[in-house]
């Protein structure tokens, strides 16, 4: 594989497109995401949260992604998504993850900086020792805690302009922690509403943050946002876009369809193709939006 994740993100930043980041809980998701990216010849990041990693296995998830990368010589990477402790960061880094997101977004700015600095110091030392390039992403601001269907804005989520990540805080955070990537709160939320689009992103705030930090920006919680809003966010500085809830909805829809059309089937692998198809369809759609295709 010619390019590393850092180079691919920088290229996306320069081209004003975004690398798609999609979470998995099983082989159905991994199969669907990889085949979607492969069909479009686009790089992709697989996300595994602490909960997803506990189910799949952290080392097992890393080995699965690495096996695809090696077999196809393909730019597919894996990120430890929303990791909340140095212990869990170490587990992911030592398992062979390409990126780790340390999430102390609910903490005060001072505590977030102190904890994130500790993570960055560990990862940089690991990179130097083993000759690898694991990226560290930091999160500044609270955007919710789960990929679920919402009926209201979760308590504490930064939606109001005065609660969004402030450019001056973003600048300080990046300078003092040394993170490679920054995920700010810009009106985005984890989860999505069932029947209406999520609230609009604050594109102006993305531009303001981009202008004062040198690292690429990451947009979390893009399930439920309109294609127009996501394209504006990417044009304004988001170089990675995360989607999870819409994949979970598609997974469930595929399962329901499979059980309805094959009511007597008991072999799991014969039910999976409809699930793969539904998730694949969403990933293709998102990757086209992220890359102006």
Image: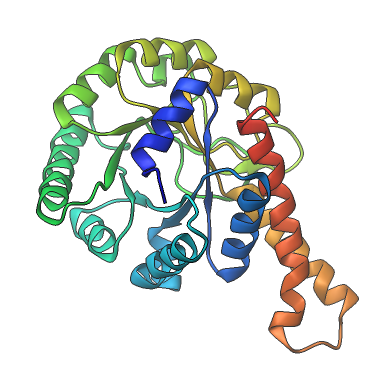
User: Looking at the picture, does residue 285 appear above or below residue 35?
Assistant: above
- Seen at 32% across and 37% down, the residue is 106
Question: Residue 174 occupies which quadrant of the picture?
Answer: top left
The image shows residue 95 at horizontal and vertical percentages of: 28, 65
- Seen at 39% across and 43% down, the residue is 3
- Looking at this view, is 141 or 181 the one in front? 181
User: Looking at the picture, does residue 208 appear above or below residue 264?
Assistant: above
Q: In which quarter of the image is the C terminus?
A: top right
User: Looking at the picture, does residue 96 appear above or below residue 162?
Assistant: below
Question: Residue 169 occupies which quadrant of the picture?
Answer: top left
The image shows residue 64 at horizontal and vertical percentages of: 45, 69
Q: In this view, does 80 lie to the left or right of 179?
A: right
Q: In this view, does 257 lie to the left or right of 80?
A: right
Would you say residue 158 is visible in this rendering?
A: no
The image shows residue 212 at horizontal and vertical percentages of: 31, 12
- Seen at 57% across and 70% down, the residue is 27
- Looking at this view, is 42 or 142 the one in front? 42
- Seen at 73% across and 88% down, the residue is 267
Farthest front residue?
A: 2
Q: In this view, does 284 lie to the left or right of 27?
A: right
- Looking at this view, is 240 or 250 the one in front? 240
């Amino acid at each position: 594989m010619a390019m590393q994740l850092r180079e691919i993100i920088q290229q996306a930043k320069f081209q004003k497109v975004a690398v798609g980041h999609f979470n998995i809980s099983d082989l159905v998701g991994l199969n669907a995401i990889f085949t979607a990216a492969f069909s479009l010849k686009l790089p992709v990041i697989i996300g595994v949260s602490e909960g997803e990693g506990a189910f799949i296995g952290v080392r097992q998830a890393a080995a699965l992604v690495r096996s695809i990368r090696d077999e196809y010589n393909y730019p597919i990477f894996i990120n430890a998504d929303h990791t909340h402790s140095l212990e869990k960061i170490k587990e992911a880094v030592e398992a062979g993850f390409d990126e780790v997101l340390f999430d102390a977004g609910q903490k005060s700015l001072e505590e977030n900086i102190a904890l994130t600095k500790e993570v960055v110091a560990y990862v940089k030392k690991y990179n130097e020792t083993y000759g690898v390039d694991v990226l560290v992403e930091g999160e500044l601001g609270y955007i919710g805690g789960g990929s679920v269907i919402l009926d209201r804005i979760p308590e504490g989520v930064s939606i109001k302009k005065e609660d969004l990540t402030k450019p001056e805080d973003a600048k300080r955070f990046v300078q003092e922690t040394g993170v490679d990537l920054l995920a700010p709160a810009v009106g985005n939320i984890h989860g999505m509403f069932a029947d209406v689009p999520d609230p609009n992103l604050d594109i102006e705030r993305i531009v303001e943050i981009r202008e004062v930090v040198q690292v690429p920006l990451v947009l979390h919680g893009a399930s439920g946002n309109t294609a127009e809003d996501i394209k504006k966010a990417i044009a304004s500085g988001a170089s990675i876009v995360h989607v999870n809830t819409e994949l979970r909805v598609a997974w469930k829809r595929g399962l329901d369809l499979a059980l309805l059309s094959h009511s007597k089937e008991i072999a799991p692998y014969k039910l999976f193709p409809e699930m793969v198809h539904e998730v694949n369809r969403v990933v293709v759609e998102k990757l086209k939006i992220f890359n102006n295709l």
